[in-house]
Image: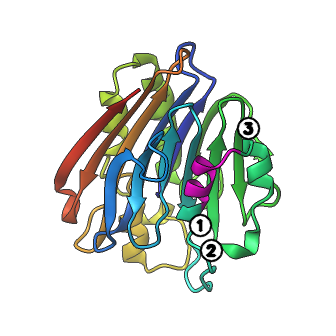
Amino acid sequence: MCLILVAWRSHPDFPLVVAANRDEFYARPSAPAGPWAEDPRVLGGRDLEAGGSWLGVRRDGRFAAVTNVREPGVPKGPRSRGLLVGDFLLGGREAGDYARGIPPGDYSGFNLLVADGQALWYRSNRDGDARELAPGVYGVSNHLLDTPWPKLVTAKARFRAALEGLPETGPLFGILADPETVPDEHLPRTGLSPEWERMLSAVFVRSATYGTRASTILTLDRSRGLTLEERRFGVQGIPEGMTRLTV
């Protein structure tokens, strides 16, 4: 997952709203969003290579999502970052307890958001201690929470405005579908080639080998009504299907 936008207790009717893109190599196998075999209360996609997930939610409102920290050349951790999502959703620990207890050396660089219905927490093993997030709108891409990369700044502003149109989710998907890249003078410098930095500067990434594989909108209303919508894409951003799950 390479872009997560979250509105936490900032909308009068929807305490949790998430708009997220998962960017990954097209060759990496994955399963569409659906109930998990280990616990059918859990809804989300699955990484079929390592067994984890990039984003998921449980029917009681338990939520988790992860992105990687872009740091080319750094050795990989022994556990897949996607397991952080699965371990939380399938477990019962409070969000803060879980976030604080993650062994940072077990994983490559990550950003993790976890919520248990009562609190939303952020943890990165590249940004010090876990912390509880106050009500508000947040965004994370492939650096740290709210790092002002151009695509994140623009997407957050559009996301904040689109919240007013809920429960209509079309404008949220519109944000996630933006293919515009950033002028070279504004690109982040993360150690990748200029061509890759340019390609990854778009909200919606597409190429012959790597790109946005899934766009997901998640809404949780005040009566604990839950809707998860996922749109899936293949090479060069060609649509490959969609799923809408409601509880």
Mark 3, secondary structure of its residue: loop
Is residue 184 visible in the rendered image? The answer is yes
- Relative side of 128 to 211, left or right: right
Dot 2 crowding, Cα within 10 Å, few <14, some 14–19, many 20+: many
- 182 or 34: nearer the eye? 34
Density class for disc 3 (Cα within 10 Å; few <14, some 14-19, many ≥20) is some
Q: Is residue 86 magenta?
A: yes
Give the mark nearest the N terminus, 3 or 1.
1
Say the numbered circle drawn on residue 133. Answer: 3
Quadrant of the frame with the C terminus: top left
Which mark, by number, is residue 33? none
| Residue 69 badge | 1
Colouring scheme applied when the structure was drawn? rainbow
> Residue 115 falls in which quadrant of the image?
top right
Q: Please tell me whether mark 1 sits on a helix, a strand or a loop.
A: loop
Reading the image, the residue beneath label 2 is 108
Q: Is residue 130 visible?
A: no
Amino acid type at mark 3: Leu
Residue at image location 42% in from the left, 76% down from the top? 194
User: Do the CB atoms of the residues marked 2 and 1 lie less than 8 Å apart?
Assistant: yes
Measured Cα–Cα span from mark 2 to mark 1: 8 Å
Rendered location of residue 187, percent (x, y) = 49, 64
Query: What amino acid is found at the position of numbered circle 1 in the picture?
Result: Val
Q: Is residue 222 above or below residue 136?
A: above
How many labels were placed on the picture?
3
Residue interval drawn in magenta: 84-92
